Amino acid sequence: MTEERNEVLAANGAFYRAFEKKDIEAMSAIWSQGIGTLCIHPGRNAIRGWKEIRASWELIFKNTNYIEIETEIITADVRNDIGYIVLVEKVLQVSAGRRIQAESMATNIFEFLGGKWYLIHHHGSPMMR
């Protein structure tokens, strides 16, 4: 494994820790603040730019009592200043008293900016089993 690949995997882990903890400040530290940043939540439209992406995470966090995420990495690679991870997200969520289990296929793309890996693209698609 290359050092860069390990760094991208660590950034990916930080993203999912922030997600599970519903920590918007930790999430903000992981995401690129650029206007080209893109997020596609499972079954939703694309959201562009950190301001709108942040608002979407705040809404998810507000409406979620508990969340647990297990990830299964399919592939991870780094090419120059871009790193990507394709993975399965196994999500257990409690919201409004309802327990929801779901799986998504996700792609997370990171860019190396100013000495740090930042998430620039997250796309989750529901998996039907």
Image (spheres, rainbow, N blue to C red):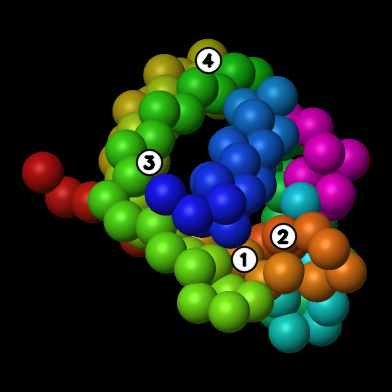
Q: Amino acid at mark 4?
A: Gly
Q: Which mark is residue 110?
A: 1
Residue at 34 percent of width and 45 percent of height: 73
Q: Secondary structure at mark 3?
A: strand
Q: Between tags 1 and 4, which lies in front?
A: 1
Residue at 83 percent of width and 77 percent of height: 34
Query: Which image quarter: residue 42?
Result: bottom left
Q: Which mark is residue 97?
A: 4
Q: Which mark is residue 89?
A: 3
Rounded to the nearest whole Å, what is the CA distance between mark 3 and mark 2? 21 Å
Q: What residue is shown with label 2? A: 117
Among numbered discs 1 and 2, the one appearing first in the sequence = 1
Nearest the viewer among 76 and 23 is 76
Among numbered discs 3 and 4, the one appearing first in the sequence = 3
Say above or below: 94 vs 90. above
Query: Which image quarter: residue 92?
Result: top left
Q: Amino acid at mark 3?
A: Glu
Nearest the viewer among 14 and 9 is 9
Q: Amino acid at mark 2?
A: Trp
Magenta span dominant secondary structure: helix
Nearest the viewer among 110 and 126 is 110
Residue at 59 percent of width and 18 percent of height: 66
Residue at 40 percent of width and 28 percent of height: 70
Say whether residue 2 is left or right of residue 37. left
Among numbered discs 3 and 2, the one appearing first in the sequence = 3
Residue 24 forms part of the magenta stretch:
yes
Q: Amino acid at mark 1?
A: Phe
Say above or below: 55 vs 61. below
